[in-house]
Image (cartoon, rainbow, N blue to C red):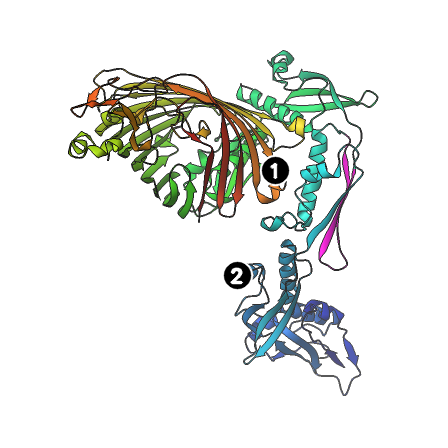
Amino acid sequence: MRLMLLASACLLPTALGVAEARSVRHQAPTGASAPGGNIIQAISVKGNTRIETSTVLSYMVAQPGDTFNQDDLDRSLKTLYATGLFKDVTLHRDGNTLLVDLVENPIVNRIVFEGNHALKDEDLRKEISLRPRAVFSSQTTAADRQKILNQYAGKARFGATVTPQIVKLSHNRVDVVFNINEAQQTLIKKIVFVGNHAFSEARLAQVISSKETIWYRFFSSSDEYNPERVKYDAELLRRFYLHNGFVDFHMVDATGELAPDHKSFYVTFTLHEGDRYRLGKMDVRSSVRHVTPEMLRPHVELFPHQWYDGTAIQNNTKNMQEWLQATGHPFAMVRSEIARNPEKHLVNLLFDVTEGPHVYVERIDINGNTITHDDVIRRNLPMAEGDPYTPFDRKYSKLGLQDLGYFSSVSVDQTQGSAPDRVNVSANVVEKPTGEFSLGGGYSTDVGILGNAAIKQHNLLGTGVDAGISGTVAYYEKQADISITDPYFLNRNLVAGADFYFIQNNYQTYQSYKESQYGMSLRLGYAYNRYLSQSWNYTLVDRQVGNFYDAAAVAQDPSLIQWVPSIYVQQSAGWSLLSQLSTSITYDRRDRRMNPHTGYMFKIGGDFAGIGGNSKYGRVKADGAYYLPLDDLTGNHDWTFQFKGGVGYMGDWSSSGNRNIIDNFYLGGENLRGFLQGGVGPRSGHIKINGQYVPTQGQEDLLGGRFMYTASAQLNFPLPMGDDLGISGRGFIDAGSLAGIRVKHNYRDFARYGQPNYYFTPITGDDLVPRVSGGLGVSWKSPFGLVNIDGAVPIRKEHGDRLYPLRFGFGQQF
């Protein structure tokens, strides 16, 4: 009896699949039966050059001493193919010896990508499994081909083709070449909504993130078809309808259909709107001890007969639960229950407060950190071992670690502890580089063309300390700064830091002097809770004001009189030392610090100068802001009304103190658009020569003042094509005024330079008449950096005010 198994492999079909297709052929006996009957006496392996015979035998099911069993031989064949080490395997019987003939798979010499432009070689190599000096496998090659196609699908290139080519080399080596035809991007040609009645297709198109392709979307990827984005858009539509009262809304289908030419997609959203509901009765029910409905009703932020808003209900539920947990009820749970009344199109709402399971943190494990110290991570978690564990703890643990900026990914998991009421919390992080080197450039109306460089480390030696060196060189300004900040000073809720800096400002485009400062600042801050914080600051600055023509120069050349600054600027000339202690208290309920959409903020602070030094004054300031979302009116999250206001006053507590012009309040520029920076308020500089007034340098010197108030109302709104181009608009009205002369002597027709016909005129502009301006602005998140343009015209101004109708600035770091 002779048993023969034959197998071979082609390039792309899986080797295992080929093995499964093989059949074992029984041949008639060609002579007397071999001694030993049907027992495998020996196994002979041939054709293996790199792989040891013992390794081959270890993969086989059939072994010496076993019978020539059909099932064992089949399984041995499959197992050898499954290793991926062999291109061809043949098993056959020679007497009582099992012969194993092998053809080894070649070794990969190198991997080459040809025709790729949209994806770099290194990006593709990260995705595939094949590696140089590894064993070549047709199965792996086929899988890698699909992975490359998936990468191109993510780039909206669904027409891409990938053809593997195997180049045979000597010594059983191969080069694997992936020939790639990237094809054009498969863009969205048309988006269709089916089943919508309450909202137009144009309105729904604003809700979703996918957009139809059009010429101006060259900076955006929103017109690239992506199946995951379409799923996300379906969820956005669901939230939008629930936000606007459609309780019974559901998405029937969201599909993308490839055009016959494989160059574009048609996306269709089929939806069921249902009826629109308003809120009816609202109530609170509580089964938690010492928590009554009367305690919680003031925390219901909704009102009857408003349109049902799923997002607002969810937020209200979360806020009530957080309030309870923060006020001594850590296990309180709040659920919202609704009851529809289809006849009246009303939804009755009940907030049900119950006692959740009592669970405590038994152990906290930190995993994945190789640089950041464990204590840095633990102090940013909202709980410690032994604390109650609530559903929000997991959420805020992840957010707290993400906000540090030290990790590329963060996950927080929980497992059962040693008892039913104990949990183990595991914070898993993947660290990322926290060092930063940046070079930048830009333009600002205030300082002109600028360039900057900075080296920063946001997690110094894993301690969480932030340190950096930066410098800026501009046409009208030079600045250098060394700073260090410890966000958890002395292992307490204290933010401490120090700055050492140099600043040189050249104001001579609109003033008649230069200023330089060398100084240091010590900072300390702490938070009373999530919303209330306080900061302290001590500043010591060596200052110099000067670089202008003085009386001595005029005595030698009387023609220089027109270049002499105001006598009040001259009073500030020379050296001064500022030693100042400052503090501020901030109550911040904004939804986010950058580009707030809702909430409010109030800040009050004061400065006291005179702890040493020769500047002796006190200064108080108060600022507030309120942000009103217009989602309900516009149905768009990009509309926001913001109101800002501020007031400040300063006074000198000693007549011997230096009254430096650079310490005063200034109005104009960013805090009063449409007016020059410092262009509103007291000013001086006209000189009377032989009975005629001559302005110094063609302009008056801006002196600043003691008392200032500002107010601003601004509407932030989206612009057509804004989402795709990163452009947003704003309209604003600014108002304010500045007054209060802060000088040592108020000279009135005071003789100067020893010549009786040279006189200085009195200070002008010292009044609290409000100045008002209105205008429009645009912000563009361009590839070159953030561009801000504000144009404003004065609605109310006074004689002598300095105007500046257009402010422009952009910058970029790279």
**Residue at image location 61% in from the left, 68% down from the top:** 178
Q: Which-is-in-front pick, marks 1 and 2?
A: 1
Mark found first going from the N terminus, 1 or 2: 2
Which mark, by number, is residue 222? none
Residue 800: percent from left, percent from top? 39, 24
Give yes or no for residue 262 being in the magenta stretch.
Answer: yes
Can residue 185 be seen here?
Answer: yes
Residue 704: percent from left, percent from top? 34, 24
Q: Is residue 68 above or below residue 501?
A: below
Which residue occupies the extreme right position in the image?
343
Q: Residues within 10 Å of mark 1 (few under 14, many from 20)?
A: some
Which residue position holds label 2?
122
Give yes or no for residue 315 being in the magenta stretch.
Answer: no
**Residue at image location 62% in from the left, 32% down from the top:** 637
| Magenta stretch: helix, strand or loop mostly | strand
Task: Give the magenta part as a residue range.
Answer: 248-271
Q: Residues within 10 Å of mark 2 (few under 14, many from 20)?
A: few
Contact, CB < 8 Å: mark 1 with mark 2? no
Local secondary structure at mark 2: helix
Q: Amino acid at mark 1?
A: Leu
Which residue occupies the extreme top position in the image?
294
- Is 605 on the left-hand or right-hand side of 267? left
Local secondary structure at mark 1: loop
Please give the count of numbered marks on the rendered protein: 2
- Viewer-closest of 493 and 613: 613
Q: Is residue 788 above or below residue 35?
A: above
Q: Amino acid at mark 2?
A: Glu
Cα distance between the residues tagged 1 and 2: 39 Å
Which mark, by number, is residue 719? 1
Residue 757: percent from left, percent from top? 21, 23
- Viewer-closest of 207 and 774: 774
Can residue 709 be seen here?
Answer: no
